[in-house]
Image: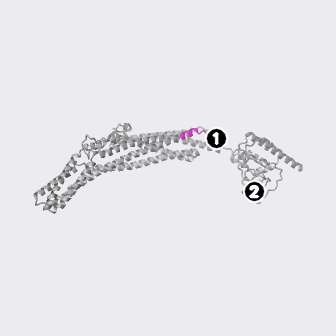
């Protein structure tokens, strides 16, 4: 697009940034022209960076006030509420994560655009530097041919042609043409100083850009990692992860504000250059190059004449005249002075080499090559570069706001986790529905109670387990079965005799959803009635054995089949097992 127009128009965002107020540290207005050597202009850039520092201070102040109010003025949660309300924290975490992901996406795009623009700038500078290097090399070679090589040949020919005055006059004319060429070549602008400046600028720019790109890439990766660790910490409710998020979140917040300040200052100073780049270049080259030469290469207009064309024309005419004179001497002098032919051929080779250098020099000194590099450099830094910096500033601003919200949500999540841990710690150990109370240590004395269970299991065989002695008490056998299998790891998975019934833990899982509060009260009443009829009957402690487990043991020892479907007719089963137990007790009393 720029090559079709052959001109340069600064984009609108450079004018917008150029119009930012330029104020020095003494709060005085400064001219917004690009003057990097001016102390007041440098202070105005520092002032723009300090604005971001003020934003950082306000963010930290808001976070400090919020955390103080959260930890000192937090309302007390109701003790009966086991699961505090976490909807607000969840939504804040989700929205913050979306903001961070969006900011990271904008940052990746801006970082890539800025890198592309700076790469195009450095590439164009390298091309221009190579062009100037070629010009300097061609001029130097031509001067060396005229001053050293031609002089040696002319001195030897003067000695040879000394008897002939007409030949010596031709040699003096050749020396005069050579002096004209030397004069025109020395009038050429010295590109060595400009070449050194361009090389230093390109190398320094490439060095700074590499570390800038790497720094932003690491910052973007850090933001993504913090976002992922935040989701993991809230999902697992890990206080350690939340503490790490707080530390790295504050660090990332500081880095976001710092990057915003640096990016804003860089975008403003680059926009100041992009608005009027020609003016700055003319001021920088006024000591080494004339203004007409600089304008010729900056604008490359067909209406502007080439200021170096006159020198190139004189160079061409002088070379042509010298070649004609040498050709005449080669035609007539070898017959009279045979030794002069070698030097004349040497002069002819030097003139041919100088003519080749002249053609190359004419092509390199044409404005189209350098002007093309100049336009590409401006397009790279002012379009892609400044646009990428604006996206990076947007990323820094979004990331700073998102991390402020995140640092406000994480302490709230911390307090909710602390409330949850406190509620679990406050559970009464005597609560019969406390799962920790249902697991009781194995009592060896219970192994002496007679039951109808087989003594083969995964941990022993029938030969290794001796049957226990019969008990003297007329305790119902289903209660012995209950005490024997009360969470004993040795007999937990032992099937009932001849029944193939599942172990008690599996029965617990099958009947877990079948019991209601009314059913549990009925079981408790039946157990109390049995204990009253048989005073020596020892019932398991209610806190250590759940009603569900007691009922399963009673049903198993009474040789009742258990179905995997939801248990029906709970009250009828209790009454039937109670009648069988009473009949056995009555039979024992009659025998006595």
Q: How many marks?
A: 2
In the displayed structure image, the side of residue 562 where residue 385 appears, left or right: left
- Is 56 inside the magenta-drawn segment? no
Which callout, 1 or 2, points at the residue further toward the start of the chain? 1
Quarter in which the N terminus is drawn: top left
Residue 415, picture quadrant: top right
Task: Compare residues 338 and 277 and report the one nearer the observer.
Answer: 338
Q: Residues within 10 Å of mark 2 (few under 14, many from 20)?
A: some
Residue 448, picture quadrant: bottom right
Query: Which residue is under mark 1?
Result: 82
- Is 88 inside the magenta-drawn segment? yes
Q: Measured from the top left, where is residue 177 in percent x and y?
A: 17, 52
Query: Which residue is under mark 2?
Result: 456
Label 1's element?
Answer: loop
Numbered tag placed on residue 498 in the rendering: none
Asked whether residue 565 appears in the rendered view, the answer is yes
Q: Measured from the top left, where is residue 227 in percent x and y?
A: 52, 44
Q: Residues within 10 Å of mark 1 (few under 14, many from 20)?
A: some
**What segment is highlighted magenta in the picture?**
81-94
Label 2's element?
Answer: loop
Asked whether residue 533 appears in the rendered view, the answer is no
Task: Compare residues 213 and 1 and report the one nearer the observer.
Answer: 1
Q: Residue at 35%, 43% (x, y): give it.
A: 378
Q: Measured from the top left, where is residue 381 in percent x and y?
A: 37, 43
């Amino acid at each position: 697009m720029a090559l079709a127009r052959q001109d340069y128009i600064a984009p609108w965002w450079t004018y917008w940034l150029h119009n930012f107020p330029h104020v020095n540290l003494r709060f005085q207005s400064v001219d917004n022209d690009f003057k990097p050597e001016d102390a007041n202009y440098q202070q105005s850039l520092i002032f723009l960076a300090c604005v971001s520092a003020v934003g950082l201070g306000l963010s930290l102040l808001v976070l400090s006030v919020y955390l103080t109010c959260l930890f000192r003025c937090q309302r007390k949660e109701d003790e009966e509420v086991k699961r505090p309300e976490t909807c607000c924290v969840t939504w804040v975490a989700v929205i913050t994560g979306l903001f961070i992901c969006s900011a990271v996406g904008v940052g990746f795009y801006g970082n890539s655009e800025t890198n592309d623009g700076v790469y195009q700038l450095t590439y164009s500078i390298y091309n221009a530097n190579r062009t100037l290097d070629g010009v300097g090399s061609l001029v130097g070679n031509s001067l060396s041919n005229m001053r050293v090589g031609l002089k040696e040949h002319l001195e030897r020919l003067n000695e040879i042609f000394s008897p002939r005055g007409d030949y010596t006059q031709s040699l003096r004319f050749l020396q005069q043409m050579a002096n004209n060429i030397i004069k025109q070549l020395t009038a050429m602008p010295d590109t060595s100083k400009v070449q050194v400046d361009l090389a230093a600028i390109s190398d320094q720019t490439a060095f700074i850009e590499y570390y800038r790109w790497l720094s932003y890439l690491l910052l973007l990766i850090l933001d993504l990692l913090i976002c992922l660790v935040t989701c993991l910490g809230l999902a697992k409710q890990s206080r350690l992860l939340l503490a790490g998020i707080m530390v790295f979140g504050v660090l990332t917040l500081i880095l976001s504000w710092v990057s915003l300040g640096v990016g804003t200052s860089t975008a403003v100073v680059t926009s100041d250059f992009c608005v009027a780049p020609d003016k700055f270049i003319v001021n920088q080259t006024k000591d080494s190059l004339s203004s007409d030469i600089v304008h010729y290469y900056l604008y490359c207009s067909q209406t502007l004449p080439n200021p170096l064309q006159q020198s190139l024309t004189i160079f061409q005419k002088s070379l042509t005249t010298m070649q004609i004179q040498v050709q005449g001497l080669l035609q007539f002098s070898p017959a009279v002075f045979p030794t002069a032919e070698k030097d004349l051929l040497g002069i002819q080779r030097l003139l041919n080499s100088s003519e080749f250098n002249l053609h190359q020099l004419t092509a390199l000194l044409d404005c189209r090559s350098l002007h093309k590099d100049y336009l590409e450099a401006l397009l790279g830094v002012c379009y892609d570069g400044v646009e990428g910096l604006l996206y990076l500033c947007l990323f820094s601003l979004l990331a700073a706001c998102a991390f402020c919200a995140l640092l406000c949500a994480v302490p709230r999540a911390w307090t909710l986790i602390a409330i949850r841990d406190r509620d679990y710690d406050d559970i009464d150990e005597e609560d019969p529905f406390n799962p920790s109370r249902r697991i009781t240590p194995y009592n060896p004395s219970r192994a002496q109670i007679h039951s109808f269970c087989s003594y083969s299991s995964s941990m022993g065989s029938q030969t290794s387990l001796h049957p226990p002695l019969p008990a003297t008490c007329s305790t119902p056998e289903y209660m012995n079965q209950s005490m024997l299998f009360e969470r004993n790891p040795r007999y937990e998975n032992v099937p009932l005799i001849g029944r193939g019934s599942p172990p008690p833990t599996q029965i617990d899982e099958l009947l877990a959803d079948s019991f209601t509060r009314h059913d549990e009260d009925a079981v408790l009443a039946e157990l109390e009635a049995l204990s009253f009829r048989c005073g020596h009957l020892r019932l398991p402690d209610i806190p250590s054995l759940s009603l569900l487990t007691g009922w399963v043991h009673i049903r198993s020892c009474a040789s009742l089949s258990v179905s995997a479907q939801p248990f029906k007719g709970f009250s009828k089963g209790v009454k039937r097992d109670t009648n069988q137990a009473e009949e056995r007790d009555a039979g024992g009393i009659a025998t006595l």
